[in-house]
Amino acid sequence: MQTEIFTHITEETIARCAAIIRNGGLLGIPTETVYGLGADALNEDAVRRIFEAKGRPQDNPLIIHVAEASWIARYCENVPESAYRLAEAFWPGPLTMILPRKKIVPLRTTGGLETVGVRCPNHPATLAVIRAADVPIAAPSGNLSGRPSPTTAEHMREDMDGRIDAILDGGACSVGVESTIIDLTVSPPCLLRPGGLPLESLRQVLGEVQVDKAVLQKMADGERPRAPGMKYRHYAPKAPVTVVTGDPHASAAYIRARAGAHTGVICFSEFAEMFTDCTVKTLGSALDKSEHARRVFDDLRFFDGTDVTEIFAQCPDATGLGLAVRNRLQKAAGFCVVEAKA
């Protein structure tokens, strides 16, 4: 298959992309979070091809992307009032809500679950494609399963060239980590995946929000994931990753004591000069969590083009967007985490 790259977003391009979706094809779509691998969420054969192209486990559910909040009632039933309050506050944006599915949404799309994740992405080109296709687009991150998520069209091309019909190049992603996933089928609501919308923002609207244990620890064998990104090893480069938490000065010192010529280091910008004999990528300033989110996947992906045999990563604290960045780094490390003592 020849994968076409659409680099100019025009009415004709949108129409061609919508036709790919309507005809059961696979399309790389830009969002504010990461690039997605999109297909008609209501077409079981198209959805099956998503799993095949990614090498994705069949029980790992997909998120469906809609054009606006009014579409929720098309695909979900028993929708709580809280869903519309969240949509009014945060859509379009990096928030996915888990709701009971209507039968029109295939079980193949939901990973066999009676619930479905729904979000409205904050990218004008992708919203235009959804409206033109007039179907929800199922779209996990557009990488091979387990690899770091793509935040540019070029990242996606590296993994998907020859596997899908086309990629719509909408520029670099502004958020850089996937959407936050909140389960509204339980009381109190439960955070299943931290992402581009901080937990603190959800609590301002909903009040109490629980945090699923899978956010910061590995799921047990046999447990079924209720949302994407919960169970399987994700975001991982080829070299093994160790995440080092704790005070930034302490974590930098811990890494420095163990780093060598073939060590990759992901660190805060303030500490980069400590690792001149290593291969280094920076997350940005220790205090800039928005920048950490934008850079984390690009940093992880970078090391696959080097000769490093191990990677150490500094890690922000778990407040604000730091919770999402920490989750992605720990998933990339298979929860190999060390706390550095000051």
Image (tube, rainbow, N blue to C red):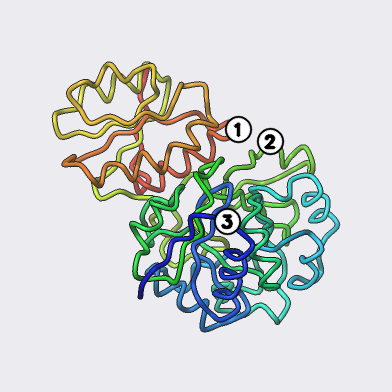
Mark-to-mark CA distance, 2 and 3: 35 Å
Dot in front, 3 or 1: 3
Residue at the disc numbered 3: 9
Location of residue 274 (image quadrant):
top left
Q: Is residue 22 above or below residue 253?
A: below
Name the residue at the bottom extreme: 45
- Where is the C terminus found, in terms of image quarters? top left
Q: Which of the marked residues, 3 or 1, is nearer the chain's N terminus? A: 3
Q: Is residue 212 left or right of residue 216?
A: right
Q: Nearer the viewer, residue 220 or 147?
A: 147
| Marks 2,1: beta carbons within 8 A | yes
Residue sticking out furthest to the left = 261
Where residue 67 sits: x, y (%)? Answer: 72, 61
Give the CA distance from mark 3 to mark 1.
33 Å
Looking at the image, residue 153 sits to the left or right of residue 90; the answer is left
For label 1, the crowd category at 10 Å Cα-Cα, with few meaning under 14, some 14 to 19 and many 20 or more, is some
Is disc 2 surrounded by few (<14), some (14 to 19) or many (20+) residues within 10 Å? some
What is the number of the mark on residue 320? 1
Which residue is nearer to you in this view: 212 or 195?
A: 195
Query: Circle 2 sits on which residue?
Result: 200
Q: How far apart are the two marked residues, 2 and 1, measured between alpha carbons? A: 7 Å
